[in-house]
Amino acid sequence: MKHELGGKEASNLKVRGFKAAAVASGLKARSALDLALIFSETEAVCAGVFTSNKVKAAPVLITMENIKGGVARAIVANSGNANACTGPKGLEDARETARMVASQLGIKPQEVLVASTGVIGLPLNMDAIREALPRLKEGLVPQGLDKVARAIMTTDKFPKLRGVRGKAQGKDYSIAAVAKGAGMIMPDMATMLCFVLTDLNISLEELKGALEESVSKTFNRITVDGDTSTNDCVLALANGAAGNDTLSSKDLDEFRGHLQAIMKQLALDIVRDGEGATKLVEVVVRGAADKEEALRAARTVSNSALVKTAFYGKDPNWGRIMAALGRADISMDPGLVDIWINDIQIVSQGIGMGVQNEEKAAQEMAASQFSLIIELHQGNMEETMWTCDLTHEYVSINADYRT
Amino acid sequence: MKHELGGKEASNLKVRGFKAAAVASGLKARSALDLALIFSETEAVCAGVFTSNKVKAAPVLITMENIKGGVARAIVANSGNANACTGPKGLEDARETARMVASQLGIKPQEVLVASTGVIGLPLNMDAIREALPRLKEGLVPQGLDKVARAIMTTDKFPKLRGVRGKAQGKDYSIAAVAKGAGMIMPDMATMLCFVLTDLNISLEELKGALEESVSKTFNRITVDGDTSTNDCVLALANGAAGNDTLSSKDLDEFRGHLQAIMKQLALDIVRDGEGATKLVEVVVRGAADKEEALRAARTVSNSALVKTAFYGKDPNWGRIMAALGRADISMDPGLVDIWINDIQIVSQGIGMGVQNEEKAAQEMAASQFSLIIELHQGNMEETMWTCDLTHEYVSINADYRT
């Protein structure tokens, strides 16, 4: 039933009734793709999740306004400039971008959702956008999502694009999603840009519920550096082109499962592509007193600079993990904690298992992906976060790159 | 009245009635000093502040027990091994250390305070300590604090030692303090080792109050990496050898001022010596709605990996500062925020002041020390934190060093 598309196959990703395009408008240097457009040939119901940062970029504010109607026809997104901390002029520029796109496409400005990512605090080059829009519209093709994924990259090293096919009420449908993100990534907030398209006929409430649930279990469970962007948003558009009847609860469950699966893939892609990252680490906390404590423990360990540098050094440095747990404000008895790297136990009842196990664990940590499992023995609750290592390259990127 | 001692002069620091010594016991490699002893010839009132980490090292637990009596005669401290996460054996080793020191000095085990710093999770080499103790006792001299400061270093690049002289009720008195700390440094917790000695005749309550106040305004206001050690403690011993009468409230205020001054110097020394740090940055948040929000804002900015890498890159990257403020959970209107580097304004009412000011600010950031001042315009409250930059060297140190 489920057919996931990733890698090369993903570059041909299409969803009925949607077209997409991207061009190099000059916002980014070196004539890289930097302006993207997604167009729905018919009205699509739409839902969004936005950054919880109090400093919200102008396009986030405008899109939060426009999405209230529950219907959209287009997403316009640029990289190279975040249009954040740009005052009233920035708001006007985001509005003007929506107006220009609407006029090109013959739709209403309120049906256009705007997203930006890149440097904070510089005025958007509106002339570049204005001149690029006709080319952008001309470029619209059903298989244009691959270009969109590349156009929204900033410090990303690879484009992030995933798709899946499902069936509901006897009709085939697709979900496709593109995302960007590598730095300023921190959980508990929408953490990057992600656009999800589907031709499923789904109600606004169903779409909203599924999107919010998926974000909380995927993008809000990843961290690269503990910082939160001013521009993050996840937008989902459903145009109903699959022509299915009202969804049964089984159909809806399946859709939620599909959506969460591709959003998890994209979330892990973002961590894998974390600035300077060489390792993707799954941090599992088990046996917590409650869900909140499980998540808080996982998050504290995942954000610890000392734990993250130890990952980089392939060092099963459980002392740093214990120290991070100890400041996580959770119910714990240090003398009950067990810790594993994959299936190699390195701590039993709060005490190290010795050099032999640590050497085996270090071998596991040499891989580009591994799990850190912590058992607290305080209850039955479990939560998972995904993080990456903290490397020399992270420092190089962020001492030089101007976000 | 106030005479501060630092640098070379500090190496002759003495406090009447106290002797100190340090030896190389073999706990650290390369026969470096690693075992230190401070001895009070008479009973001293003592106060302590300990790590808030739930994972507390064995010596912290034993010292918390012994300090309850309010009187101490000795501090024994080792580097090279934290004796943390070592279970019942670790507790017994810390107790045994206190017993051995007591027997050498002819005092009670409960009068010995124990501190350890270094690698977590390995058993303490008790034979090394046992063999070294007679030499340690023989080495006790009034000017031994300089050696103590060197013996408690781990990744520290320089010893941290400060002194000050005061007068109370017509009698001269001294305060001397040694500290260590470079990594696993995070505010809101006692954050390192610090031993304070004074010959002032002061009551236990007065000493406790002064110590707690000083810690909250100095060591709890610094951050290197947002991590908290399992071993941190600040201990203060006052032996009354100055022979002064009961302190007047003016005397006490002066003592508190002196104490806070040298503890601030040591706190800044720790940040200056932050692992890999090249810059000491004072982060001042003004105009906050309340004290807590001022501190939370200062702390979030001070701990942001993106802000700290920008410091390293001499980049007045105010967008990252705004983004950090936006996630600090404080009352703020982005459109009211002003930001300065020293006296160069880079943000006015939430908007950048332009390239010229940023270039000037970048010049200020080339220095080894500068201030970042943030005005929120939400109220009158102000708080200050001290942080350092996040550098390649931090990653190198922590990917290789086993804490």
Image: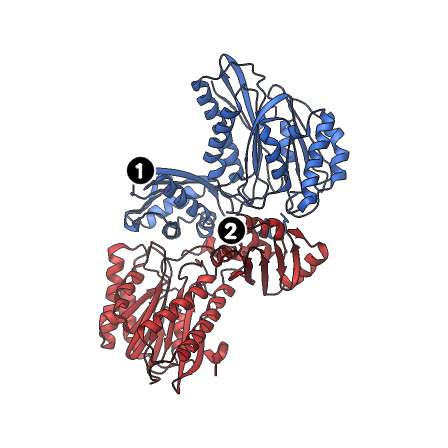
Chain colours: A blue, B red
Q: Write the residue at 49% across / 76% down.
A: B6
Q: Write the residue at 33% across / 65% down.
A: B115
Q: From the viewer's perspective, tell me whether residue B285 is left or right of residue A257.
A: right
Q: Nearer the viewer, residue A68 or B236?
A: A68
Protein chain holding label 2: B
Q: Residues within 10 Å of mark 1 (few under 14, many from 20)?
A: some
Measured from the top left, where is residue B328 in percent x and y?
51, 50
Extreme front residue here?
B379
Amino acid type assigned to the residue bearing label 1 in the image: Asn
Q: Write the residue at 37% across / 76% down.
A: B197
In the rendered image, the vertical position of residue B341 relative to residue A12, given as above or below:
below
Q: Write the residue at 55% across / 40% down.
A: A51
Q: Is residue B31 visible?
A: no
Element type where label 1 sits in the image: loop
Protein chain holding label 1: A
Measured from the top left, where is residue A64 in percent x and y?
59, 35
Gap between marks 2 and 1, in whole Å?
34 Å
Extreme top residue here?
A170
Amino acid type assigned to the residue bearing label 2 in the image: Ile
Measured from the top left, where is residue B389 in percent x and y?
55, 58
Q: From the viewer's perspective, tell me whether residue A122 is left or right of residue A247.
A: right
Disc tally is 2
Same chain under badges 2 and 1? The reply is no
Tell me the quadrant of the picture where the C terminus of chain B can be found. Answer: bottom left
Q: From the viewer's perspective, tell me whether residue B346 is left or right of residue A394.
A: right
In the rendered image, the vertical position of residue B47 relative to residue A175, given as above or below:
below
Disc number at residue A3?
none
Q: Is there a contact, CB below 8 Å, between mark 2 and mark 1?
A: no
- Residue that label 1 marks: A380
- Residue that label 2 marks: B330
Element type where label 2 sits in the image: loop
